[in-house]
């Protein structure tokens, strides 16, 4: 506008130039005009911190912006974007940034789930934004809806598929009958899973995201150490096929729920009825199902990983933080006022499907049912199928045939995890029980 001084550019420092950082840099540089119009001031990418200057990089990132001196870069910035990952030096750099008055944007769920109080206390004391939309479910807007849009409601439950790699693996096991190892190898070949797939397969990544969602949903500090975690390593092709036979699909779920006693946060594989919206989430996609008192059920769905999708969420946070710099105001501070009790893993209440192999003779079903009754676990359905109708197979070559056997599939009503664990141990000890094939929780029914 004639006579109007152009606004001072906002200095953006980018920490990391990998899968996500490269796309954040590209978005800042190629989308500069749109971003300036949306913010009300230009965003100037002043530098990109990396470990190794010699690494070949996407030409979209000008080499002259690269530096290994992350500290100096942070010191001169208005907004610091952290997409380097890991706890250190990311933590120290973010704390340095907020103490210096910069707003920070991070995609680092591992850091948030471990150092949440420290980061928020520093950001709130400095009066700057701490934003992290990309840290949960990549491109899927879920942090802002839970943190801001539902701030006037009461969230009851969050149920999500928040790890794309494990969803891809379980999907391949379901559609192709693959065993876990084969499906993980496919995920690695496609770039979903790391060479060491532990963070995904063993549920650490999903647990970090569950901690973040629970902290926001229940206004209570939840760290990754408070999350009961079980990954998908023990899930077999047989489990997946058995699930399908009963109208379920196996999903790795992150669950955070408010009960009369407190908050339960857990990550584990679960059977989801095929008609539930989460059952339809295929491949590496993510989805989060939120139930709130007023809003009722809400579903958020999209790409949970990848450079461009994740950068989309990061850039949204950058625009929001930049607008606050230009127009005044700031994003929400930490809200942990409710400080609800965090329940131990064995206090969780859910339904279970137990598969076992038993001797096929009179009275066995009654014995099994009696053990469940003794432990106060109520049976919803029982299915029996003959496993070895002739009793012809001996357990060991040369040994006597073991007699006819049957598969039993028990689905329980809702029961406490502790009661179920005691029940399964007692059932396993019954003389006619040959094997407990699997115990899987049933969610979303
Ligand atoms: P990458 O490993 O691809 O990139 C990490 C970048 O950070 C690299 O450029 C690396 O430098 C740089 N870096 C790492 N350590 C240091 C250090 N000590 N000093 C300076 N630079 C350093 O990671 P991603 O881009 O995949 O992930 C980044 C973050 O985003 C993580 O927190 C991740 O959890 C999160 N995230 C990632 C998603 C994805 O799909 N990839 C999805 C959602 C969140 P150099 O290149 O020199 O090695
Ligand atoms: N490894 C994660 C996933 C992506 O598979 O969903 C980063 O959050």
Image (tube, rainbow, N blue to C red):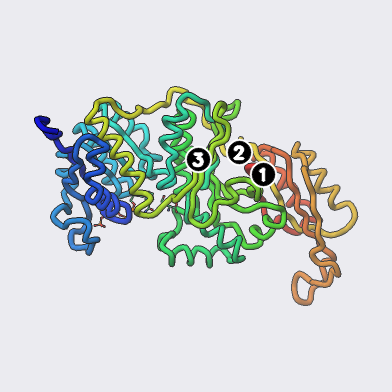
Q: CA distance from mark 3 to mark 2?
A: 12 Å
* Disc 3 target residue: 227
Judging by the rendered image, the residue that carries numbered circle 1 is 421
Image quadrant assignment for residue 179: bottom right
What kind of element bears circle 2? helix
For the residue pair 333 and 327, the one nearer the viewer reads as 327
Q: Would residue 396 appear left or right of 82 to someone viewing this image?
A: right
Q: Is residue 257 visible?
A: no
Asked which quadrant contains residue 332, the reply is top left
Give above or below for 379 relative to 171. Answer: above
- Around disc 3, counting alpha carbons within 10 Å, would you say few (fewer than 14), some (14 to 19), or many (20 or more)? many
| Viewer-side label of 3, 1 | 3
Contact flag, marks 1 and 2 (Cβ < 8 Å): yes
Q: Which mark is residue 346?
A: 2
Label 3 and label 1: CA atoms lie apart by 18 Å
**441, above or below 53, in the image:** above
Percent position of residue 29, x then y: 22, 50
Which residue is at 31% across, 43% downward?
315
Where residue 379 appears, as percent x and y from the top left, is: 77, 42
Q: Secondary structure at mark 1?
A: helix
Is residue 50 left or right of 398 when viewed as pictured? left
Disc 1 residue lies near ligand 2 with CB under 8 A = no
| Sequence order check, earlier mark of 3 and 1 | 3
Point out the image quarter for the C terminus.
top right
Query: Which part of the image, by quadrant, shows the N terminus?
Result: top left
């Amino acid at each position: 506008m004639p006579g109007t001084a152009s606004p001072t550019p906002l200095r953006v420092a980018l920490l990391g130039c990998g899968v996500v950082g490269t796309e954040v840099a590209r978005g800042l540089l190629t989308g500069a005009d749109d971003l300036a119009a949306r913010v009300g001031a230009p965003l100037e990418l002043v530098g990109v911190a990396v470990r190794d200057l010699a690494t070949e990089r996407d030409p979209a990132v000008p080499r002259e912006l690269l530096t290994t001196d992350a500290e100096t870069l942070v010191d001169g910035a208005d907004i610091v974007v952290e997409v380097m990952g890991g706890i250190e030096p990311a933590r120290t750099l973010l704390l340095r940034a907020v103490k210096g008055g910069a707003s920070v944007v991070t995609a680092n769920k591992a850091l948030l789930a471990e150092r949440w109080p420290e980061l928020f206390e520093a950001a709130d004391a400095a009066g700057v934004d701490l934003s992290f939309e990309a840290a949960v479910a990549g491109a899927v807007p879920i942090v802002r809806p839970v943190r801001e849009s539902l701030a006037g409601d009461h969230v009851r439950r969050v149920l999500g598929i928040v790890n794309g790699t494990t969803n891809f693996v379980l999907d391949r096991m379901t559609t192709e009958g693959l065993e876990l190892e084969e499906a993980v190898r496919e995920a690695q070949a496609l770039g979903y899973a790391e060479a060491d797939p532990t963070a995904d397969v063993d549920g650490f990544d999903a647990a970090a995201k569950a901690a973040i969602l629970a902290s926001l949903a229940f206004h209570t500090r939840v760290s990754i150490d408070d999350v009961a975690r079980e990954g998908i390593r023990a899930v077999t092709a047989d489990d997946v096929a058995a699930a399908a036979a009963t109208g379920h699909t196996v999903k790795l779920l992150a669950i955070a729920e408010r009960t009369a006693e407190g908050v339960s946060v857990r990550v584990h594989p679960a059977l989801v009825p095929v008609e539930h919206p989460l059952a339809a989430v295929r491949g590496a996609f993510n989805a989060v199902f939120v139930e709130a008192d007023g809003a009722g059920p809400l579903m958020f769905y999209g790409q949970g990983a990848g450079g461009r999708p994740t950068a989309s969420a990061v850039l949204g946070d950058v625009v929001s933080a930049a607008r606050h710099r230009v127009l005044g105001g700031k994003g929400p501070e930490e809200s942990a006022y409710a400080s609800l009790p965090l329940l131990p893993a064995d206090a969780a209440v859910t339904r279970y499907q137990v598969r076992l192999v038993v001797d096929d003779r009179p009275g066995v079903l009654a014995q099994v049912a009696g053990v469940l009754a003794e432990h106060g676990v109520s049976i919803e359905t029982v299915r029996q199928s003959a496993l070895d109708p002739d009793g012809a197979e001996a357990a060991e070559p040369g040994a006597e045939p073991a007699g006819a056997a049957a598969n039993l599939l028990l689905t329980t009503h809702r029961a406490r995890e502790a009661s179920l664990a005691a029940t399964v141990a007692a059932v396993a000890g019954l003389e006619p029980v040959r094997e407990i094939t699997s115990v899987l929780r049933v969610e979303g029914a």
